[in-house]
Amino acid sequence: MSTSGIVYRPRRLRTTPRMRRLVAEHRLHPGDLVLPLFVKEGIDEPVAISSMPGQVQHTEATLHDAVAAAARAGLGGVMLFGIPSVRDALGTQAAAPEGILQRGTRIAREAVAAVEAERPGGRPGPVVMVDTCLDEFTDHGHCGVLASDGTVDNDLTLDRYAAMAVAQARAGAEVVAPSGMMDGQVAMIRDALDDAGFESVSILAYSAKYASAFYGPFREAVDSALQGDRRTYQMDAANAREGLREADLDIAEGADMVMVKPAGSSLDVLRGVADRSDVPVAAYQVSGEYAMIEAAAANGWIDRRSAVLESVLAIKRAGADVILTYWAQEIAAWLERPSPHAAATPTEGP
Ligand code: PBG
């Protein structure tokens, strides 16, 4: 026994930046990060999204540049969302061959191919993932087709998702990501993709997706027309067990990856899904999580970079293999060039 009587001194492993880096249990890597991107039909200049400072609705040309930049930064993926200029009750543009999301998908694939061609044998570019949901395409803003009583009709919606996923695959989507929380959507999409000859297109299922106030800024990002809410299809924040069941069902239906969303307020569910899932697990740090940190940082109330890195590292620690975050591009740049101060945190550095 030492004279102090203290036997265990965990602080020893925190003494220096070198030591902290050595014993870090989790690290961020650009290859784990997916950047969500918005492309809008019929605009000549990108449009700023005021509730998401630093994020924009892209033109087709600036989408190309953004995907190319993501490729150069070594990001693991991009997730595309489309904003059509025409909306209708069925969300017809969602599955149109020349719909904005299909155009965006082709552009993204071209941008990745162009950057990969610059340095053959170099780092692979991002996987092109596409949101498979009707809410950006319907005039009522719901994620599905409405029945005569105004509720979202699950089974009618599935046919639309199947057509949409096939159109996305035709345009070059490598991953389709059904986010509408309809029952049976993964099985339906898997069948449709296989029937159309796209058996190698993957499904990233938004499995445990909560009806969340943190999607608020996203509604501006996609010019959403939604009246009411999504509580009859997205999950209730009161439920954790249900999130695990949703993930189990999606895996059983053929999901190649499952997602928990929003990430920051569902870390318990994320941990639970990660513990029982034998497919990769993704988490989406959503628009409201982004907006909160940006707003606090803009006011000088928190240190932006530290808060961003801590929030994303927490998602990793909770079990995410893949993290969707609007900061993906910036984080990749930070990881490439750690600042002298940041080297003291285990989130950065090689
Ligand atoms: C549905 C979809 C939404 C988000 C991703 N996919 C909106 C919603 O379900 O209301 C939200 C993402 C975010 O808030 O960053 N297409």
Image (cartoon, grey):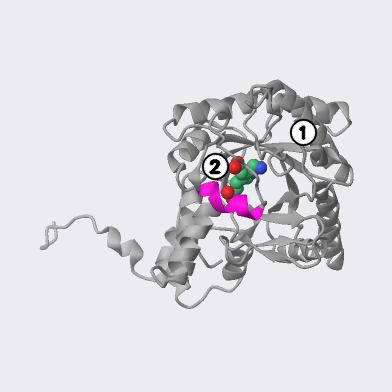
Name which residue lies at 56% across and 66% down. 350
Residue 323 shows in the view:
no
* Position above or below: 306 against 263: below
Residue 289: x %, y % from top left: 50, 54
* Position above or below: 240 against 348: above
* Magenta stretch encompasses residue 95: no
Mark 1 highlights which residue? 90
Secondary structure character of the magenta stretch overall: helix
Q: Nearer the viewer, mark 2 or mark 1?
A: 1
Name the kind of residue labelled 1 in the image.
Leu
Q: Which of marks 2 and 1 is nearer the N terminus?
A: 1
* The residue at label 2 has a CB less than 8 Å from ligand 1: yes
* The residue at label 1 has a CB less than 8 Å from ligand 1: no
* Position above or below: 10 against 190: below
Residues under numbered marks 2 and 1 in contact, where contact means CB atoms less than 8 Å apart: no
* Magenta stretch encompasses residue 220: yes
Residue 146: x %, y % from top left: 69, 28
* Left-right relation of 35 to 119: left
Residue 179: x %, y % from top left: 65, 37
Element under disc 1 = loop
Q: Quadrant of residue 156?
A: top right
Name which residue lies at 75% across and 37% down. 202
Q: In which quarter of the image is ligand 1?
A: top right
Label drawn at residue 261: 2
The one nearer the camera, 241 or 99, is: 99
